[in-house]
């Protein structure tokens, strides 16, 4: 229902009717009174009551449109207010003294930690700053300061300013040279002793004379490559000549040092300096643990000795079952200690394993070939056979039809497929008892391995061993061919035990050499002697004798080394 024709939505009475006393005039007066009451009571202040026009009252159902401000400041204030409300609802910084342990408290602790980390990330650096120079120095001023500064000569220091040369300064007839030169020369592989001296600056005649003197003490070929010589050359006797040798010192062998010195008369003399050497073998014992290699290396065993130990044990028995984590390994290595402090480790001579306090393996190197023998005198046992050629088996042991003769007969070996010229290797150590043409076998080699075991390798293109020669396991004895009764390049391999052909695939290991008689007695005597060596004894330093002790170089040290006697 509307308020009348003259009413407005803003609350104002509207336009006053023109006829006084009329119906419109009464309504107009009533609206004025109502507006006055609203202004005085409920809407006191800046609020103004809306006065609606007749048209607005009639269109009361029309949609209302709110006009918003489009200024940048008002939009920024609205965005800031909205952001503040959202942050208030998130409650990122609650009071940590309340609700300890709740989700709200954990959220506040996370905010504290994050803000602290952010603050520490911008922690200032307190490193010293480089100060600017008091004044700019050009190149001339810097050179003047450098010449007057107190600095080592090696860093460019001078003793003061230098003046330009005057007419009183004259050229020297020759530049002065150093009165003595000390240098180090190294003997390299394939080089000669005399040529090495000549390259170091020694004259040809003196180099030949020194080489002849050294050869009287030991053969020059026995001087190991890498040997270093300390050479001292004196002043030249005349311009353009070579410097004479004053002294030469070097370590010729582990137990011998040689020195060349010039006497007062000008002659060169050779001085031998024997070095006392202790050759007590080095014995190392320890628990295998997770890794035998790491355990032995930590105990002081050389890397080469550990590798030889693993190889010896692996060739004598199954490595996986021979060693366990709780077993005790025992190895003895040739070892030399010089009185001058040098040490040199050699080959492994003993490899042992103990389990529960009892030895399960005892291997000692013996003989000129360096084989390992068990404590009983039986040679090393090598599991399996080395394949003579790297190829598959084409024909096996047994009856078959011969491809050339055309009838069935016994095939007393294995035929390996291999290309022409493939190297043929000995399946194990042995001695050549036959080498040459052997009928239908063509060019062949026959080996004896001891204990009645023999092998034969047929149809070779050529052989590289001769009868009576000893061969080792894996050594090349010939090359694959197709000589004799053969339809193509291959290797026919045979094995005999007691003169009777056997199937090579039925043999799991070869027979072992065995010591007997006087050799067995000396073997056991040597084994008993090295077993008396204490573990780690060779790692101690040799006690130096009087002449082997280092002599003090300073006079004050010499006085301190003298014994103090009593006075009075």
Image: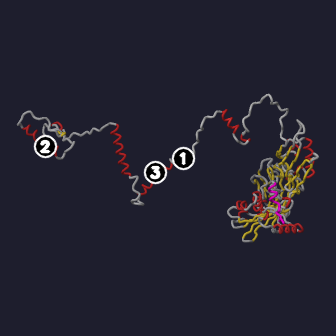
Query: Closer to the observer: label 3 or label 1?
Result: 1
Query: Closer to the observer: label 2 or label 1?
Result: 1
| 56 horizontally vs 368: left or right | left
Q: Nearer the viewer, residue 44 or 15?
A: 44
Q: Nearer the viewer, residue 249 or 113?
A: 249
Residue that numbered label 1 is attached to? 125
* Residue 413: percent from left, percent from top: 80, 57
Name the element at disc 2: helix
Residue that numbered label 3 is attached to? 115
Is the C terminus in the top left, top right, bottom left or bottom right quadrant? bottom right
Residue at position x 60%, y 35% in the image: 135
Q: Place residue 234 in its image quadrant.
A: top right
Q: Which of 208 and 137 is in front in this view?
A: 137
Of labels 3 and 1, earlier in sequence is 3
| 532 horizontally vs 320: left or right | right
Is the N terminus in the top left, top right, bottom left or bottom right quadrant? top left
| 183 horizontally vs 106: left or right | right
Decide if residue 188 is in sight here: no
Q: In this view, does 358 lie above or below 320?
A: below
Residue at position x 85%, y 32% in the image: 173
- Separation of disc 2 and disc 3 at Cα? 61 Å
Residue at position x 73%, y 67% in the image: 328
Q: In this view, does 380 lie above or below 395?
A: below
* Residue 452: percent from left, percent from top: 85, 63
Of labels 2 and 1, earlier in sequence is 2
Residue that numbered label 2 is attached to? 34
Is 240 colored magenta in this rendering? no
Q: In this view, does 409 lie above or below 57?
A: below
* Residue 227: percent from left, percent from top: 83, 49
Of labels 2 and 3, earlier in sequence is 2
**In this picture, which residue range is highlighted in magenta?**
555-568
């Amino acid at each position: 229902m509307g308020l009348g024709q003259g009413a407005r939505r803003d609350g104002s009475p509207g336009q006053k009717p023109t006829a006084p006393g009329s119906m419109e005039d009464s309504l107009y007066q009533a609206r004025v009174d109502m507006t006055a009451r609203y202004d005085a009571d409920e809407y006191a202040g800046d609020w103004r009551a809306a006065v609606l026009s007749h048209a607005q009252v009639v269109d009361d159902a029309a949609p209302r449109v709110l006009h918003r401000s489009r200024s940048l400041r008002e939009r920024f204030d609205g965005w800031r207010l909205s952001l503040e409300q959202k942050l208030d609802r998130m409650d990122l910084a609650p009071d940590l003294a309340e609700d300890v342990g709740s989700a709200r408290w954990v959220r506040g602790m996370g905010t504290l930690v994050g803000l602290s980390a952010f603050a520490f990330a911008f922690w200032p650096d307190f490193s010293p700053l480089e100060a600017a120079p008091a004044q700019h120095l050009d190149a001339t001023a810097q050179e003047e300061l450098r010449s007057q500064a107190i600095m080592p000569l090696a860093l460019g220091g001078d003793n003061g300013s230098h003046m330009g040369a005057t007419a009183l300064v004259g050229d020297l007839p020759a530049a002065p040279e150093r009165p003595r030169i000390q240098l180090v020369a190294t003997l390299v592989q394939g080089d000669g002793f005399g040529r090495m001296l000549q390259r170091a600056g020694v004259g040809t005649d003196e180099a030949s004379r020194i080489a002849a003197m050294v050869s009287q003490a030991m053969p020059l070929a026995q001087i190991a490559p890498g040997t270093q010589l300390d050479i001292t050359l004196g002043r030249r006797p005349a311009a353009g000549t070579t410097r004479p040798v004053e002294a030469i010192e070097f370590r010729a062998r582990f137990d011998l040092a040689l020195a060349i010195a010039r006497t007062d008369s000008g002659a060169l003399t050779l001085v031998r300096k024997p070095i006392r050497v202790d050759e007590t073998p080095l014995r190392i014992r320890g628990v295998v643990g997770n890794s035998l290699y790491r355990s032995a290396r930590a105990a002081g065993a050389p890397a080469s000795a550990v590798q030889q130990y693993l190889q010896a044990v692996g060739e004598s028995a199954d490595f996986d079952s021979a060693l366990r984590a709780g077993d005790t390994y025992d190895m003895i290595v040739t070892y030399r200690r010089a009185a001058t402090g040098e040490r040199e480790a050699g080959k492994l001579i003993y490899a042992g394993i103990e389990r529960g306090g009892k030895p399960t393996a005892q291997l000692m190197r013996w003989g000129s070939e360096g084989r390992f023998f068990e404590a009983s005198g039986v040679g090393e046992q090598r599991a399996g056979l080395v394949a003579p050629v790297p190829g598959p088996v084409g024909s096996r042991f047994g009856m078959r039809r011969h491809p050339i003769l055309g009838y069935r007969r016994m095939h007393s070996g294995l035929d390996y497929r291999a290309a022409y010229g493939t190297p043929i290797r000995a399946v194990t150590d042995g001695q050549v008892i036959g080498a040459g043409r052997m009928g239908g076998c063509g060019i062949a080699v026959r080996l004896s391995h001891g204990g009645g075991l023999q092998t034969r390798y047929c149809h070779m293109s050529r052989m590289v061993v001769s009868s009576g020669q000893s061969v080792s396991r894996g050594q090349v004895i010939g090359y694959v061919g197709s000589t004799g009764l053969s339809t193509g390049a291959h290797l026919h391999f045979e094995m005999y035990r007691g003169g009777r052909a056997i199937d090579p695939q039925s043999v799991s290991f070869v027979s072992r050499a065995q010591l007997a008689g006087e050799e067995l007695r000396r073997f056991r005597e040597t084994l008993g002697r090295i077993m008396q060596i204490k573990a780690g004894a060779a790692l101690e330093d040799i006690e130096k004798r009087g002449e082997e002790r280092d002599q003090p170089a300073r006079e004050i040290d010499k006085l301190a080394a003298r014994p103090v006697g009593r006075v009075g």
